[in-house]
Amino acid sequence: MVSELEFERPIVELRNKIAELKEFAKNTEVDLSSEIDKLENRLEKVENDIYNHLSPW
């Protein structure tokens, strides 16, 4: 089991949502690529914001 740190929660939630949408799109053949792209861009921004503002302590 992978445990997440509190500050990583938004990242984990976005990754989970992206995985859910990809699985749903695959199973239903619904094109969700635009929404998935938006979430992936948002994930990248959130990761950068979080990890660039970490302090050593």
Image (tube, rainbow, N blue to C red):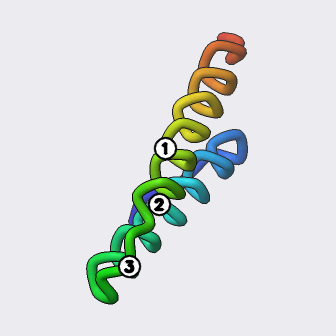
Q: Position of residue 56 (x, y in %)?
A: 66, 11
In the shown orientation, is residue 33 left or right of residue 50?
A: left
Mark 1 vs mark 3, foreground winner is 3
**Number of numbered discs on residues:** 3
Is there a contact, CB below 8 Å, between mark 2 and mark 3?
A: no
Q: Secondary structure at mark 1?
A: helix
State the residue position of label 2: 18
Mark carried by residue 23 = none
State the residue position of label 1: 40
State the residue position of label 3: 30
> Residue at point 64% right, 33% down?
46
Residue 25 placement: quadrant: bottom left
Residue in front for this viewpoint, 40 or 52? 40
- Amino acid type, mark 2: Ile
> Residue at point 63% right, 13% down?
52
Q: Earlier in the sequence, mark 2 or mark 3?
A: 2
Q: Earlier in the sequence, mark 1 or mark 2?
A: 2
Q: Position of residue 40 (x, y in %)?
A: 49, 44
- Amino acid type, mark 1: Glu
Residue in front for this viewpoint, 51 or 35? 35
Is there a contact, CB below 8 Å, between mark 1 and mark 2?
A: yes
- Quadrant of the image containing the C terminus: top right
